[in-house]
Image (tube, grey):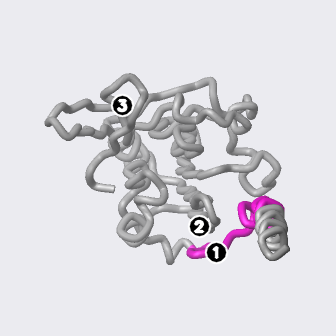
């Protein structure tokens, strides 16, 4: 009888645990949140969260010049049971010269990944005119459910720097910045997508990231 009751208890515990998984997976805690351009601090984000973000945010500027106009900024990171959700969006309107300098910087971004045996592979940022509502420079394109890109407007000298981890197509705040084809955000096999910061040296079995995360 005692053994039978013990088995029953174990079964009830397993059922209860399984029933809680969706709740655990959906619950999250805000670990970082700012919305004032004066609080922009790329160094702090990289030092504290680059491993969670799978990025060193090289696409984003190190600082915002005092001459930049129409600056909008928000950064929110949420730590859930399985991953870190993140939204980092910085919008800047530059002077013509500053804009050209920033485009030059962005267009030359690259990351060299080194394997344990010393092998190296270098990825480069790529330019695209089809995926997003505006022409873009892309450094992460869906790898591990993360996206990092800059939307550019040559006429207005405007750049919107965007980092998203586990984006939701239902989030109205940044929905206008998402890909034209939003079906990619529903794909569960995200390791087949690309990141400038990662490379597989064994045909996709394992992935190596840059060392300065």
Q: Which residue position is annotated with label 1?
A: 30
Residue at 73%, 68% in the rendered image: 27
Foreground disc of the pair 3, 2: 3
For the magenta stretch, what is the residue range?
Answer: 16-36
Residue that lies at the very extreme toward the left in this rendered image: 118
Is residue 190 covered in magenta?
A: no
N-term-proximal mark, 3 vs 2: 2
Q: Callout 2: few (<14), some (14-19), or many (20+) C-alpha neighbours within 10 Å? A: many
Question: Residue 142 sits in which quadrant?
Answer: top right
Q: Quadrant of the N terminus?
A: bottom right
Residue 11, numbered circle: none
Left/right of residue 147 with respect to residue 3 in the rendered view: left
Going by the image, does 174 lie left or right of 78? Answer: right
26 to 144, vertically: above or below: below
Kindly check if marks 2 and 1 are in contact, taking CB atoms under 8 A apart as contact.
yes
* Label 3 crowd (10 A; few <14 / some 14-19 / many >=20): some
User: Disc 2 and disc 1: Cα gap in Å?
Assistant: 6 Å
**Residue 203 at what x, y percent from top left?**
38, 22
Front position in the image: 74 or 71: 74
Measured along the vertical axis of the image, is residue 27 above or below residue 56? below
Q: Quadrant of the C terminus?
A: bottom left
Q: Can the viewer see residue 19 in this picture?
A: yes
Q: Is 27 in the magenta?
A: yes
Q: Secondary structure at mark 1?
A: strand
Q: Would residue 211 appear left or right of 61 to someone viewing this image? A: left
Measured in 3D between alpha carbons, the distance from the residue under mark 3 to the one under mark 2, in whole angstroms, is 27 Å
Name the residue located 31 percent from the left edge and 36 percent from the top edge: 108
Q: Nearer the viewer, residue 140 or 113?
A: 113
Residue picked out by circle 3 = 200
Q: Can you give x and y, in whole percent of width and height, for residue 123 in the image?
A: 33, 32
């Amino acid at each position: 009888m005692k053994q039978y009751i013990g088995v029953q208890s174990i079964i009830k515990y397993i059922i209860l645990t399984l029933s809680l998984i969706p709740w655990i997976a959906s619950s999250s805690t805000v670990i970082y949140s700012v919305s004032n351009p004066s609080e922009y601090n790329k160094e702090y984000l990289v030092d504290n969260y680059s491993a969670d973000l799978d990025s060193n945010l090289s696409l984003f500027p190190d600082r915002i010049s005092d001459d930049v106009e129409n600056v909008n900024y928000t950064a929110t990171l949420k730590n859930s049971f399985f991953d870190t959700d993140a939204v980092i969006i910085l919008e800047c309107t530059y002077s013509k010269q500053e804009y050209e300098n920033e485009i030059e910087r962005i267009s030359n971004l690259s990351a060299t990944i080194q394997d344990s045996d010393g092998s190296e592979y270098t990825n480069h940022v790529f330019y695209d005119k089809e995926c997003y509502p505006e022409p873009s420079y892309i450094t992460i394109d869906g790898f591990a459910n993360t996206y990092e890109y800059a939307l550019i407007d040559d006429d207005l000298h405007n750049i919107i720097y965007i980092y998203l981890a586990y984006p939701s197509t239902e989030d109205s705040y940044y929905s206008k910045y998402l890909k034209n084809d939003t079906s990619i955000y529903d794909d569960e096999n995200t390791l087949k997508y690309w990141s400038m910061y990662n490379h597989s040296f064994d045909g996709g079995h394992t992935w190596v990231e840059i060392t300065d995360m």
